[in-house]
Image: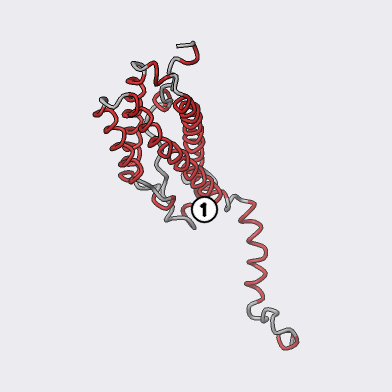
Amino acid sequence: MLAQRFPSFPSLRALPAFIVMALLLPLLAGCGYNTIPTAEENAKAAWSEVQNQYQRRADLIPNLVATVKGYAAHEKDTLQAVVEARAKATQVTISPETLSNPEAFKKFQDAQSGLTSALSRLLAVVENYPDLKANQNFLALQAQLEGTENRIAVARRDYIQAVRDYNLTLRTFPSVIWATLWFRNNQPFQNFSAPEDKLTVPKVDFGTQQGG
């Protein structure tokens, strides 16, 4: 009769299941059911920020190379190495959906490390050109690059922690219960393998801070 008077009201036959679900959903939330998807989304968001900051660095490099070339055109090999490393780094990307792929993640990390190394060699070469170190455009690029390297370090640190949190939810109690019952397709995310001291890129200093 209730179903006839109120078509949207659950039928008497379905009423027990409706009541069970109404009682079960709050219990699931209270017992940590949302822990895994929440940690997963936090890790994905942290990864997006990592990629944003690496892209920010890549965007600065063309102007940096052009400025250096204006004063040190004969440093052709060093400049070309930076250009090639940037091209490779920008071609290797990882979507949040593939963060569990170890081969893809290593490829991304290697590409970014290659760019860091090439950029460091270029900055070492710059020390031989006092006029370049005093160029206003170069000084502006210096400040932007320093800020970007700091942002990369922070983004990587936050991603490392977010992945640790997420991976722990997949193998620790009580969230491991939900991982076994409901999130069986969830795999641990890959993390940066370099030690913490290797994550800090050499400080971009062209001698200007000491009047050089």
**Can you give x and y, in whole percent of width and height, for residue 171 in the image?**
46, 44
The residue positioned 31% from the left and 29% from the top of the image is 118
Image spot of residue 60 (x, y percent): 43, 36
Give the percent coordinates (x, y) of residue 210. 49, 11
Q: Is residue 90 above or below residue 12?
A: above
x and y percent of residue 170 in the render? 47, 46
Q: How is the image coloured?
A: secondary structure
Q: Where, quadrant-wise, is the N terminus in this rendering?
A: bottom right
What residue is drawn where x is 61% and y is 56%? 28
Mark 1 lies on residue: 178
Give the camera-side residue of 43 and 130: 130
Whether 53 is drawn above or below 126: the answer is: below
Mark 1 residue type = Trp
Image quarter of the C terminus: top left
Q: Residue at x 47, y 55 (%)?
A: 183
Taking the image as shown, residue 13 lies to the left or right of residue 106, namely right
Whether residue 38 is situated above or below residue 58 in the rendered picture: below
